[in-house]
Image: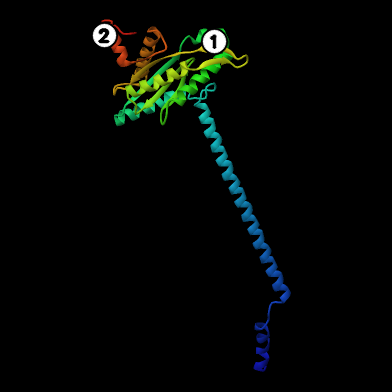
Amino acid sequence: MPIQALCSPLRATSKREIEPEALGALAARLLAETRRMQDTNRMLEQKLEASRDDIAALQRDLDDVRRESLLDPLTKIANRKSFDEGLRTAISEARQTGNPLCLILMDIDHFKSFNDTYGHQTGDQVLRLVAMTIKSNIKGRDLAARYGGEEFVAILPNTDLKGATIVAENVRQAIHGKELLKRSTNEKLGRITASFGIAAFHPADTAGSLIERADRCLYAAKHAGRNRVLTEESLAEIGEARGGVTAA
């Protein structure tokens, strides 16, 4: 057989080309697949973004719940739980740094009588008023809290006894200076007063011992006539004047 005859089919095969229609169809499939992948990626990105938004919203909700759990529902200042945490932290920092720390404990004078006379709704208004008065007279890292009933506390980091006394006097005067009105009738209800006890942190103190000393000062302020501020120093002076007897 001639050599040319054998080589002829090989030449025909090597020169074979893809038909334009097939090439167009292949390109169309590739383009469609690319677009499908792009759409899929966009959907995944949208879902991922939505998931991030959901996670962020959930975190905000959790933060809101935590904040609410640390607030007194009536007065909207810190509650007892928040106070307990705040005092432990303040004591730890004062012990580490050696900086001063004071605790103010205050009680609204004759509040039960006021509540019984004018009703619980008016009494609640008074509690909110006192809470806002305390809060407006502290600053920075100070913490005002409702301790229970008509008792309130203020934690004053980096504040010595003299500075804490100034804060307590400002609050006392602000409370006494407000004339109360019954909202529903505009009836004048007179004025309220509050008594204050202040203790300064000592290195050996626990939260309980610091609160106990502030409570002794408050007790003495009540028995000394109310509507006044007594500190550990003033309590000691009273004790010396009475021959060494202090309030129990």
- Quarter holding the C terminus is top left
Q: Position of residue 13 (x, y in %)?
A: 67, 83
> Any mark on residue 158, and which?
none
Q: Circle 1 is placed at which residue position?
A: 115
Q: Amino acid at mark 2?
A: Glu
Bin the neighbour count of mark 1 within 10 Å (Cα to Cα): few under 14, some 14-19, many 20 and up.
some
Residue 167 location in percent, x, y? 39, 23
Q: Is residue 34 left or right of residue 147?
A: right
Element type at marker 2?
Answer: helix
Q: What residue sits 64% from the left and 62% below the top?
A: 34
Left/right of residue 63 with respect to residue 32 in the rendered view = left
In the shown orientation, is residue 26 left or right of residue 149? right
Asked which secondary structure carries label 1, the reply is: helix
Residue nearest the viewer, comparing 83 with 159: 159
Q: Which residue type does callout 1 highlight?
A: Asn
The image position of residue 142, as x and y in percent, is 41, 28
Q: Quadrant of residue 118?
A: top right
Closest to the observer, 13 or 95: 95
Up the image or down, 237 lies above or below 14; here it is above
Quickly name the residue at label 2: 240
**Hey, which residue is sitting farthest right in the picture?**
21
N-term mark: 2 or 1: 1
The residue under the point 29% across, 22% down is 204
Q: Nearer the viewer, residue 79 or 138?
A: 138
Quadrant for the N terminus in the image: bottom right
